[in-house]
Image: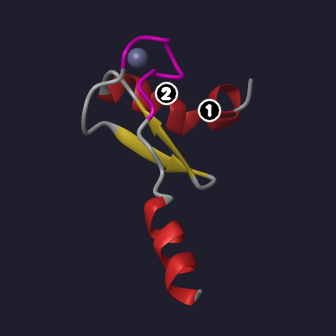
Amino acid sequence: MFNSLFKKNKNDSPKKPETDPVCGMRASDGITLMYRDKLYAFCSDHCKKEFGEHPGLYSTH
Ligand SMILES: [Zn+2]
């Protein structure tokens, strides 16, 4: 029983989003940021920086 719980928890990793929340374009590999336990991905460092400065604008819709 414990083992099955552990297994389920282990598979529950955050999946990488495919869309940049700042500009709406397809996100690039490797440009990601964790914010409030959610993973966000971006098309460029510019958008990542923009999100970092105004996370409230992009993290909720
Ligand atoms: Zn972008």
The C terminus appears in which quarter of the rendering?
Answer: top right
Q: Which residues are magenta?
A: 17-26
Up/down of 45 relative to 30, above or below: above
In the rendered image, residue 48 lying in the magenta stretch gets the answer no
Instruction: Find residue 10 and report its horizontal and vertical position in percent.
Output: 45, 69
Q: Quadrant of ligand 1?
A: top left
Residue 20 figure quarter: top left
- Does the closest atom of ligand 1 sit within 8 Å of the Cβ of label 2? yes
Disc 1 element: loop
Q: Residue furthest front?
A: 1
Left or right of residue 10: residue 57:
right
Characterize the local packing of mark 2: few (<14), some (14-19) or many (20 or more) Cα atoms within 10 angstroms.
some
Scheme by which the image is coloured:
secondary structure
Instruction: Find residue 7 and report its horizontal and vertical position in percent.
Output: 46, 73
Q: CA distance from mark 1 to mark 2?
A: 6 Å
Of the pair 3 and 37, the residue shown nearer to us: 3
Of the pair 52 and 3, the residue shown nearer to us: 3
Up/down of 58 relative to 33, above or below: above
Where does label 2 land, which residue? 50
Marks 1 & 2, CB-CB < 8 Å contact: yes
Q: What amino acid is found at the position of numbered circle 2 in the picture?
A: Glu
SS majority, magenta = loop
- Residue at x 69%, y 26% (from the top left corner): 57
Disc 2 element: helix
Q: What amino acid is found at the position of numbered circle 1 in the picture?
A: His
Instruction: Find residue 23 and report its horizontal and vertical position in percent.
Output: 49, 12
Where does label 1 land, which residue? 54
Residue 48 figure quarter: top left
Instruction: Find residue 4 and report its horizontal and vertical position in percent.
Output: 53, 78
Up/down of 2 relative to 50, above or below: below
- Residue at x 46%, y 57% (from the top left corner): 13
